[in-house]
Image (cartoon, rainbow, N blue to C red):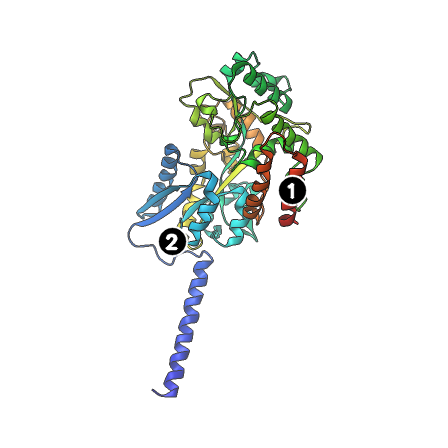
Amino acid sequence: MSTHHTKGSVRALALLLVLLLSISALFAQGSPEPSKPQGPVALKIATWTSNPDQIALLSSFVEGFAKEKGLPITATFESIPFAEYNTKLSLELQGSNGPDLFWVLETAAPAFIESGLLAKLNDGMKAYDPEDISADALELWSKGGNVYAIPFSTSPFFILYNKDLFAKAGLKTVEQYVAEGVWNWETFRMAAKAIKDKTGIWGFQTVDGQGFDARILHNLAPMVRSYGGDFWTDDGQVLINNDASVAAVKLFHSMVYQDASVVPPGNQSDFFAGNAAMTVGQISRVSKLNDASFAWGLAPMPAGPKGESPVIGQAAIGAHSKSKNVALASELVAYMTNKSSVAAMAGIWPPARKSVLESDAFLTSNKSVTAEQMKLAVATSIKSGRVLPSHVKYPQIEVESKMVFDKLWQPNANVKAILDEVAAIYTKYTK
């Protein structure tokens, strides 16, 4: 083979390599696929819900999208338990069989964006009126002018309570306490203790029964913030061990170990089965009361010395940047959060779309919840509430701080000293 021919071959190979890299870069940036996939497309979607009605609703969106695209699509839903969701999902996304679409928790949003595992959705959103999505709701899921996930749920936490147990303990209804302007954490504590003392049934179960474990922040945030404290702020201030935060955590600790009114760590007593008088819920959990054997009510979270501080649980859906069908998956994310899809979900997962949130139909979107309850405990709280703190290092923060929070769950725990330890961990990552 001549030298000239060899050099020509090298140059040709080099040009081919540059071309291939250029094409790969285009796909990495989330550019549309050059042609429609041939034959059925299989997509895997990861969520933390296993509710069959909710899965059926999500499946209907896939069917609608497939019809719109004129393309057969088969969707497989993977339900990962909430307590292990972030860990298991992260491992799957690093492998070869990760989901094409997946739900993302608000606390992990910066970490997932930084990881590069979320595809850019700007192009996929264009056909579905992106201006209708609240800019505030999108803020957490955007970076550098790009959107990496779209919120499908902006859902405040509120109190669900057993009216029968309140009556049996000789208490007013929570709605009455709200109307009198005395629905605060002291009244909440009083009611929980009265019910435990007079009926023998627990006064309060933490959110999903996971307030000592996977949902420590969800459990403590409404108290801590309404007392004037917080965990950490966007600009790196650590507040979990200030006087206000310590006072709030001491209140909860006293309920568990002095009043013995809270379902304690390790106990499986469940509000929805009638084994606790109150719990913290969201609209998506109300369906668990469809066959309840007791009368129940719904009310905003109690107020603290600094007033009410509603906590919003926000969840978004994103597309896997390394999916074989990344462009199609990105479009499906946008379709699943378009106006009609969001309207269909509104009674389960409160919307981030302004046109749906501000509609009268939203207030009557859940047949088990009155329009007044939806307005008071959901719509109003969406406007004034805040999401939990998030950080690009949240996975590390969560693991390390949980080991310290575990020390709280004993009768003689030194609350201030333990929160000082938690503060040291937060400071290490947020400063």
Quickly name the residue at label 2.
325
279 or 199, which lies in front? 199
Residue displayed at 56% across by 41% down = 402
Point out the image quarter for the N terminus: bottom left
348 or 182, which lies in front? 182
Q: Is residue 38 above or below residue 298?
A: below
Quickly name the residue at label 1.
421
Q: Do labels 2 and 1 touch, CB within 8 Å?
A: no
Q: Is residue 324 left or right of residue 131?
A: left
Visible residue check, residue 138: no
Q: Is residue 165 left or right of residue 303?
A: left
Snapshot quadrant of residue 375? top right
Q: Is residue 293 above or below residue 263?
A: above
Q: Is residue 342 left or right of residue 246?
A: left
> Looking at the image, is mark 2 or mark 1 nearer the viewer?
1
Furthest-front residue in this view = 412
Q: Secondary structure at mark 1?
A: helix
| Residue 302 in picture, x, y percent from top left | 61, 25
| Residue 181 in picture, x, y percent from top left | 64, 19
271 or 7, which lies in front? 271
Mark closer to the chain start, 2 or 1 = 2
Q: Alpha-carbon neighbours of circle 2 within 10 Å: few (<14), some, or many (≥20)?
A: many
The label number, if any, that marks residue 71 in the structure image = none
**Kind of residue indicated by mark 2:** Asn
Q: Alpha-carbon neighbours of circle 1 within 10 Å: few (<14), some, or many (≥20)?
A: some
401 or 128, which lies in front? 401
| Residue 184 in picture, x, y percent from top left | 63, 23
**Kind of residue indicated by mark 1:** Glu
